[in-house]
Structure formats: C-alpha cells, structure tokens
Image (spheres, rainbow, N blue to C red):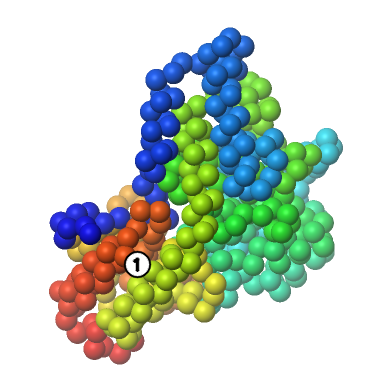
Amino acid sequence: MPRLSDPIYLDHNAGAPMRPAVREAMIEVMGEVGNGSSVHSHGRKARGRIEDAREKVAQLCNVKTRAVTFVSGGTEANMTALAPAWQDQGVPVYLDKLFISAVEHPSVKTGGRFAVADQEVVPVTSDGLIDLGKLEELVANAEPGLISVMAANNETGVIQPVSEVGRIAREYGHFFHVDAVQAAGRLAIDLDAWQADAVTLSAHKFGGPQGIGAIVVRTTGRVPSPLMVGGGQENWRRGGTENVAAIVGFGNAAIEALEDLEQVRHFAEMKTRLEAGLQSTCSKTVIFGEQSDRLANTSCFAVPGISAETALIAFDLERVSLSSGSACSSGKVSVSHVLTAMGVDEHLARCALRVSFGWNTSEADIDRFLVLWPKIIDRLDPQARHRAA
C-alpha cells in the first residue's frame, strides 16, 4: 500500500506513465544503430523492429499491418486525417466540407487542412452526445465531405455513438474519421463496426512513449494525402526517418493495451466507488455526462463554489496529480469548450475537475483521493458542502 507521502497520479487521459516493459524495450533499441531505410544489416534490423511494432498496433485496431502509418503523435495523426484531398482506389477525391462535433479535441476542432469556411460544427446534447439528427440534416444533401467524431471525450469520458455516425456517413456518401486517442486500451477499436475510414492513436495515452502515434485506415485503397512529404518512408504516406525506439515502445504498449481491455470492469468498479464517494462527500456534486456511457477510467465532476484552479493546487500540495475539466493556455485556466457545448453554466464549468486512471492505478490511490477531497473542500470553502447548488 502506498505511503501517505507517495505521489499519486490520476491524470492518465493527459498522459499515462510509461509501462516498465515499454521502457526496457526502448532502452535496448537506443543502444542500437540503423536507419530503417538502409539495406545493410543494421538497417534491416531496424526495419524489422518497425514492422514488428506495426503488426502489434494493427492487432490493437484489428486491421491489416499495412493499414498502420506511424506519425509523431495524435495531433499529427489528426492533421493527416483531416485532409480535403484523399485517394480512393487510386482516384484523387476532393472532399467539400468537414463536419465535426462541438466537443472535439483542439487538434480536430481547428479543422486540420480544411479552410475555416469549409467547416461545420455539429452540436451535442446536454449529456455530451453528438446530435445525430442535426448531423444527418447537415450531411444529407451535402457534397461528399469528411465527418470527424471522437470515440470518447478526453474531458468527460463520454463515448460517442460512432457506429451510428459511420452509418450516416456511408448512407450519404461521406468519409469518416474517428479520433480514438482516448479509446485505445479502454474500448475495443473496430474500424469495420464503426464504418470508419481512418482512426488516429497516440501511444502515450496508454503507457507508450510521448511523440509517437499512428493513423490507421480501414483499407489502404482509401487514404488521405500525406501531410509530411519527402522520402518514401511509411509506404510514401509520411516522409521522414522513423523513430525506431519510440515505434518499438508504441508496439509494446499496444499489446499491453489490448490486455487492459480485460480489466475494464475493474476500472468501472473503481470509478463507481470514486463517484459514490464524491456524492457522499457532497450531495451537490455534479458529474458531467453521468447519464451517458462513459470510459471506465474517467470521471469529470464539480462542486459548486470550489474553483478547479485552487483545488488543483491544493491536491498538488498533497502530491496528487489530476486535471481540470478546462483547457490550460499560458498558465491561465479557461472555460472548457466541451462543457460549454453541453450547456454547462460558466461558473460551474470553472469548478470542473477530472480524475482519469489506468494501468498503474490502485484501490489505495482512490482511497487516498477520497480522504483528501472533503478536507480540501472544507479548507477552500467551509460552506460549500451545505450551499444550495
């Protein structure tokens, strides 16, 4: 059991701790030399490591190996996918518009390579779910475009009905991209079931290294135009010498993430206990997206009157790391666009905190959090637990 002085990390959605097996594999590779594009023995060994990792990431997504293209992370993967120009069975296709939900990650919210005038934002319900009726209304008579909807929200954990979005995309002749960065290791990734043309991943969200991700396509006959051009690396889909050590780490993390799917029930039990404790501590606690299916590892909540910014500082002083439900820019906490899109009042949104856990989170970590939380509330605002919402 951790000592009270031991640090506790409850911010896996921002970046999970690196898994020991991943670190060991990367250290071994870092002692080697070789460019995966070279034909000599050192180069062939590096190429073998890259292709072995590619196969492992393909297993995570239940696709063929050649469907995986390694990139520098989730943001580059999304920028690559959000392209007006695609190849469809060797034929150039130009997509007219980009349709995104109002709660997408900033790397999708900025629209990728689509002009601002060519972007349409689809509203969400108060439960954080994309308005399927509005989406269908927008795309029904539109020229072929790209629909981009995340599998699960990074702030609230709300799981989107991506299979239904995929059905709408197919019915009206649109392409479909899923940002699955938060889904890997927490949901089964199935491009066929989702009817998704592409999904995007980032290794550090499930225990791999930072700075490596992937764009995964359902068929290599339908791919977006490259973002990074240069040499013929990654089957001409992403120029630049591959980061062999990071790719190997990604592959090892992908296999362990697959195994994590067997522990989702345990994560859900921990979240249930956490949220019961939150409600017991303060009956005015609001859990965002509570009525929707959510990731088993994510809880976004608020106590009216308890500022997220001051609560985060208080937890940090206790050596507990979690996150605000809002985005931080230049050290300033601003209101979350996700909660705003859900219709959450600005004052309450500024109180939003997020706990997210993963492969190394223990029951004792949750216990410690639940011991500290009422003390922090009473320290910051002694009347908060008795004030009307």
Tell me how many marks there are.
1
Q: Is residue 26 left or right of residue 114?
A: left
Above or below, 285 relative to 252 = below
Type of the residue with mark 1: Leu
Residue shown at the point (54%, 51%) measured from the top left: 258
Residue shown at the point (64%, 67%) measured from the top left: 161
Q: Secondary structure at mark 1?
A: strand
Q: Residues within 10 Å of mark 1 (few under 14, many from 20)?
A: many
Q: Is residue 157 visible?
A: no
Q: Is residue 28 left or right of residue 43?
A: left
Residue 139 locus on image (x, y percent): 76, 63
Above or below, 230 relative to 325 = above
Residue 132 locus on image (x, y percent): 68, 71
Residue shown at the point (56%, 15%) measured from the top left: 43
Give the camera-side residue of 40 and 79.
40
Residue 58 locus on image (x, y percent): 63, 42
Q: Quadrant of the C terminus?
A: bottom left
Give the camera-side residue of 205 and 341.
205
Residue shown at the point (39%, 43%) measured from the top left: 19
* Residue topped by disc 1: 353
Above or below, 195 relative to 213 = below
Q: Quadrant of residue 171?
A: bottom right
Q: Quadrant of the N terminus?
A: bottom left
Residue 118 locus on image (x, y percent): 68, 53
Q: Is residue 96 left or right of residue 384?
A: right
Give the camera-side residue of 324 and 34.
34
Q: Is residue 167 visible?
A: yes
Q: Quadrant of residue 129?
A: bottom right
